[in-house]
Image (cartoon, grey):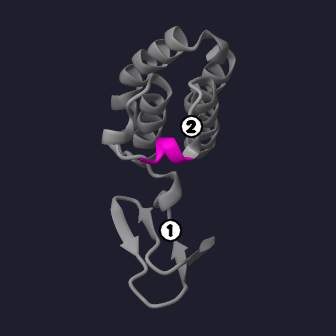
Amino acid sequence: MSLKINLAQGESILIGKAKVQNGGSGRCVLIVSGSENVLREKRIMREKDAITPVRRLYFLTQSIYLADDKPVLFDLYHQIAREAVAAWPILTGPITDIGELILVERYYDALMACHGLVDIERELMGETAEETQK
């Protein structure tokens, strides 16, 4: 099965470990076939931006999603998950759910669930999206 991706001018995407960017002057359409993981630019978190407990959890979940050898990262994931729960006990249930998604190898679903927690953490910290992107 193929995945059809529309990229805006300058937008990039990760396909496996390769970053692909639309360098043209308009939109482009990519058809991706195969088993590589795909992640749009707006969902990619850089390590230097993983500065809070939940953002570190997101970055590690992203790393698991993109990794070839996922089990190597599981112990670190559990450590970071404990830190996130310690910082935000109210998020214990959702963080547990994310861990269960990882256990059943639904890595993309875990990543998207974790993305929602980043937004919740931002609200708990009283930040706006614009402040976070600075």
Q: Which residues are magenta?
A: 130-134
Q: At label 1, which amino acid type do we have? A: Gly
Q: Residue at x 39, y 72 (%)?
A: 20
Q: Position of 12 compared to 18: left or right?
A: right
| Residue 1 picture location, percent across and down | 63, 70
**As drawn, 27 above or below 43:** below
* Residue shown at 53% from the left, 73% from the top: 33
**94 or 129: which is nearer to us?**
129
- Viewer-proximal residue, 26 or 18? 26
Residue 119 image label: none
Q: Please tell me in which quadrant of the rendered image residue 93 appears.
A: top right
Seen in the picture, residue 125 relative to 35 is either above or below; the reply is above
In this rendering, position of residue 71 left or right of residue 35: left
Residue located at (61% from left, 10% from top): 89
Element carrying mark 2: loop
Residue 107: % across, % down = 55, 41
